[in-house]
Image (cartoon, rainbow, N blue to C red):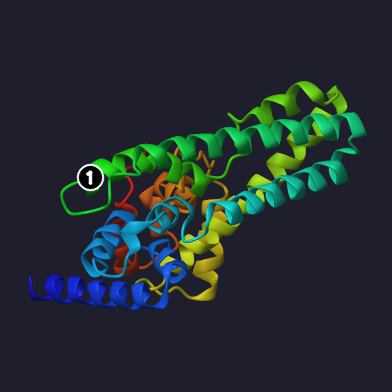
Amino acid sequence: MVGIGRHKRKQAQSASECVNSGTHSLAHWACNGTHLRVVVLLVILLLPTRGWCQNDQWFDSWVFQGRQQADYRQKLEAQLEAQLAILNRDLELSDQQLEKLRTAGRGDINRFLSKVDAIRKKTAQMNPNQENIQELWEIIMPIQQTAQRGLLTHDSLFRKVLVVTLSDEQRRREQENEKANRDHLYAVLTRQTIAEMEQSVPLVSHQRRKLLDLLLAQEAVPVDGPGSESIVGLQRLCKVPERELANILDADQLKHVLQYRSRLKQP
């Protein structure tokens, strides 16, 4: 219990330092391992006299991680143009195809920001406090998760227009590129999982190499939801039979690895 109390005091001290250094630092802190609701509650407790609740700053900090909405729109526009540039490089799109996709992407941006404006108006008279934080969080969480995940996802207008706009050959190439990019991402995430695990279970080089090969041989099936791709490596680790891990690890290492992967139940 003493350790838990010390941990909470350390979190509160860290939150206070982030608050004093500005909303951008606060958002960065929230995105690096601390639940956003904890951050929000600490902000409410630490900033009652600094006028935060007199304007939109708290709303933008929750939804856009410290950015203002105008800056976030520019970020979304830049992401759209970057995606179009990649598609055009790989698929050699026509001007008409590019314009259709650009229009669809801007439609996704406008639709999302319209939802943001509607929720901003709904919460305009709800200055954050300890009594209404749960209600505020439930209202804002869906758009905050969308902002974190990104707009050009599989259910976006952009992706739907892309499917019907491409020729059969372009669609085949796009699917191949998408798979190659996904496989590369999952390989990186799997290496990160091993690196994280090694903080408590050090491996020698040949063990690390064999374990990586074993994990990469497992099918990676991402779980739906924001940030779900981060568990790809752990998911792969859960699919490896214990006897195969025992061929690589010693008894003590195996014990710790089994404890590590118990954080995610094997499907």
Q: Is residue 9 above or below residue 162?
A: below
The percent position of residue 241, horizontal first and vertical second, equals 40, 47
In the rendered image, the quadrant that contains the N terminus is: bottom left
Q: In the depicted view, which residue is nearer to us: 111 or 195?
A: 111
In the rendered image, the quadrant that contains the C terminus is: top left
The residue that appears at 37% across and 74% down in the rendered structure is 18
Q: Is residue 51 above or below residue 167?
A: below
Q: Which residue is mark 1?
A: 134
Question: For residue 150, what is the image quadrant?
Answer: top right
The percent position of residue 212, horizontal first and vertical second, equals 54, 59
As drawn, which residue projects farthest toward the left?
1
Q: In the depicted view, which residue is nearer to us: 35 or 179?
A: 35
The percent position of residue 182, horizontal first and vertical second, equals 64, 45
Question: For residue 88, what is the image quadrant?
Answer: top right
* Horizontal arrangement in the rendering, residue 220 relative to residue 12 (left or right): right
Q: Is residue 45 above or below residue 170?
A: below
At mark 1, the secondary structure is helix
Question: For residue 23, what is the image quadrant?
Answer: bottom left
Q: Can the viewer see residue 94?
A: no
Q: In the depicted view, which residue is nearer to us: 81 or 224?
A: 81
* Horizontal arrangement in the rendering, residue 26 relative to residue 49 (left or right): right
* Horizontal arrangement in the rendering, residue 101 relative to residue 113 (left or right): right
Q: Residues within 10 Å of mark 1 (few under 14, many from 20)?
A: few
* Horizontal arrangement in the rendering, residue 202 relative to residue 151 (left or right): left
The residue that appears at 76% across and 37% down in the rendered structure is 176
The residue that appears at 21% across and 65% down in the rendered structure is 45
The percent position of residue 96, horizontal first and vertical second, equals 89, 29
User: How many numbered discs sit on the rendered protein?
Assistant: 1
Q: Looking at numbered disc 1 in the image, what kind of residue is underneath it?
A: Gln
Q: Can the viewer see residue 77?
A: yes
